[in-house]
Image (cartoon, helix red, strand yellow):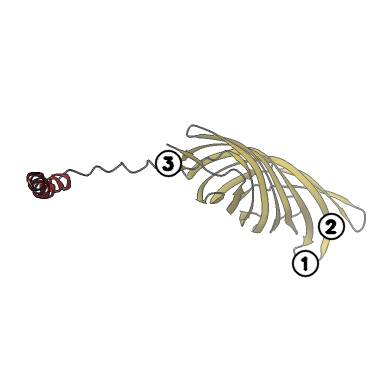
Amino acid sequence: MKNLLLVTCSILALGAVAPAFSADLAAQPVYKAPPPQVAAAIYDWSGLYVGINGGWGLSDATGGTVGGQIGYRQQLGQAVFGIEGQGNWADFSGSNVSSTFPLNTNRSTTDAFGLITGLIGYTSNNVLLYAKGGAAVTSNTYQVTSTLTGAQLASTDNTRLGAAVGAGVEVGFAPNWTVGVEYDHLFMPDANVNFTTAAGVVATDRIRQDFDLLTLRLNYKFSPPVLRY
């Protein structure tokens, strides 16, 4: 009987202590693990790229152009260096009075051009500002017509070498895609062009052909952006 009474008292004592102990446990502060650190995407301009471009050319001969480009860039810190080749179909045409034969009109047409340029730029994440310069080549057709009658008197084809300088801005809008706008000036030296008439007479005239280009560009870069902490 005495043992039964002791057991009963012990159970009652434990029943009284357990709620208080549970209350003390519930009052303990809850510690949460800090959120994981997330890497910020920093656009890396290094890599091979290909793209298309289109725009307008302005000079004595004006018109539209469309073409493509391929190049490689290397980013070092915030500096970007690169090399690019560009080839374009063009429809630049214009005319002026012959400097040698005032009664005749020279008509110049550029149907294609190419550029090989080096690039140096500065980047702020996915925005690239750059300048470029190098060599240029144009494919041209020159015609001489009579100012009075409009009849074609002579024509000749010509390939001309020169230089190009330019500048542009490009923005990465997706992991591998960039869009930009570029201005270029092509320095095509004045040259003496020989024309042979239908009668077999050779005439020479001096033709100037610098022009300005403004193009919109879309590039696909084969290297994705690099994640950095």
Amino acid type assigned to the residue bearing label 3 in the image: Ala
Q: Secondary structure at mark 1?
A: loop
**Label 2 crowding class (10 Å Cα cut-off): few <14, some 14-19, many 20+?**
many
State yes or no: discs 3 and 2 in contact (Cβ < 8 Å): no
Is 226 on the left or on the right of 211, as rendered?
Answer: left
Which residue: 63% across, 39% down?
72
Is 187 on the left or on the right of 199, as rendered?
Answer: left
Residue placed most toward the observer, 14 or 60: 14
Residue highlighted by disc 3: 39
What's the distance in space between the residues labelled 1 and 3, CA to CA?
69 Å
Q: Which mark is residue 154?
A: 2
What's the distance in space between the residues labelled 3 and 2, CA to CA?
67 Å
Residue placed most toward the observer, 65 or 86: 86
Which residue: 56% across, 44% down?
224
Residue highlighted by disc 1: 150
Counting from the top left corner in percent of width and height, residue 129 is at 49, 42
Counting from the top left corner in percent of width and height, residue 193 is at 79, 47
Count of numbered circles in the view: 3
Q: Residue furthest right?
A: 200
Counting from the top left corner in percent of width and height, residue 146 is at 78, 62
**Label 1 crowding class (10 Å Cα cut-off): few <14, some 14-19, many 20+?**
few
For the C terminus, which image quadrant? top left
Of mark 3 and mark 2, the one earlier in the sequence is 3
What's the distance in space between the residues labelled 2 and 1, CA to CA?
12 Å
Amino acid type assigned to the residue bearing label 2 in the image: Ala
Residue 3 visible at all: yes
Of mark 1 and mark 3, the one earlier in the sequence is 3
